Image (tube, rainbow, N blue to C red):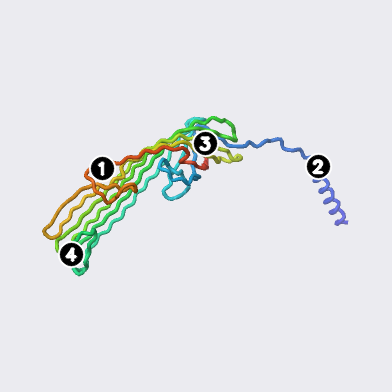
Amino acid sequence: MKKSVLLIAMALGVSSSFAQLSTRENDDRVEKIGARPKAGDMAFVFALPLSNDSGKAKLFDGNALKSGSLLTYKYYMSDDVVIRLGFRLMNENSTIKGSGLDSSAQYNPNGIAAPYSGVKDVRRKEKSRMYEIVPGVEKHFAAGNIFDAYAGADLYLGFGRDMTTSNYDYINGDHNYMTTKTGTTDVGIGFITGFNVFIAHLPVSLGLEYGWNAKWTFGGIDKVSTDVAVGTTAYTEEYKQDNSTTSESSARYSKLKRREFNAETNQDVRLVLHIYFGK
């Protein structure tokens, strides 16, 4: 009797469930597509270069999460005006200091034709630094929640400096000191066009950028200073060398300047991913 009552109750419950399912109404709510950023929003920017061309008018590859890539961000000044900023700070240093073990070692580090006795002291230092900053601005035109088109401009500033100091003192009193300094300045401007496609209701968009670049390069000249003493002969010398591949790097000059200008379309073609966030 108890089993029969239980079975009847279960049957009534199932029937009620089917009745509810059969009379259920569809949800009329419509999910929005896209999450277009507004004034005050910001974005992390990740850019994958699509152009394999390493042309001289190239400003920067973007930020593909590689060593040496620019850190890139955006800020929405208004709904349709965006400030861009990319920057890179690189600094490398290495130093070697030592004293010779005895006078039996013979060493001639710079090819000077003289019989050195053993090295007494050595001091060698290498420095390399590179600062890059790329400010820019975008003007957006499409106001839809799916597709976004824009045009803009970037200013590229790059400052590099390398220095190598190599000082050797020898037991017999000879010495050979050499310092090489190289400075480079890059100035560029790029006009870009691009578009974004907003993904679902996520704060994410995927797009493409391309345009025209111009770039000026100044410097790239090695400034060399030497101080050499071998026996009773001692002299100092200062000269300049062109370290580019377009000339003979071993030639020495008292005065030397170097400048390059290059302009080209589509030197920087980038697939761009934005991840947006608010204050």
Amino acid type indicated by mark 4: Pro
The residue at 79%/43% (across/down) is: 21
Q: Position of residue 118 (x, y in %)?
A: 19, 66
Q: Nearer the viewer, residue 258 or 34?
A: 258
Contact (CB < 8 A) between labels 4 and 3? Answer: no
In the image, taking residue 193 as reference, residue 249 lies left or right, namely left
Q: Which residue is mark 1?
A: 256
**Label 1: how many residues lie within 10 Å, few (<14), some (14-19) or many (20+)?**
some
Instruction: Residue under label 3, please give it.
Output: 194
> Of callouts 3 and 1, which one flags the residue occurring earlier in the amino acid sequence?
3
User: Who is closer to the viewer here, 98 or 213?
Assistant: 213
Query: Which mark, residue 115?
Result: 4
Query: In the figure, is residue 184 to the left or right of 104?
Result: right
> Spatial distance from mark 2 to mark 1, Cα to Cα?
89 Å
> From the viewer's perspective, is the residue at label 3 or at label 2 nearer?
3
The quadrant of the picture occupied by the N terminus is bottom right
Q: Quadrant of residue 103?
A: bottom left
Q: Are marks 2 and 1 in contact (CB under 8 Å)?
A: no
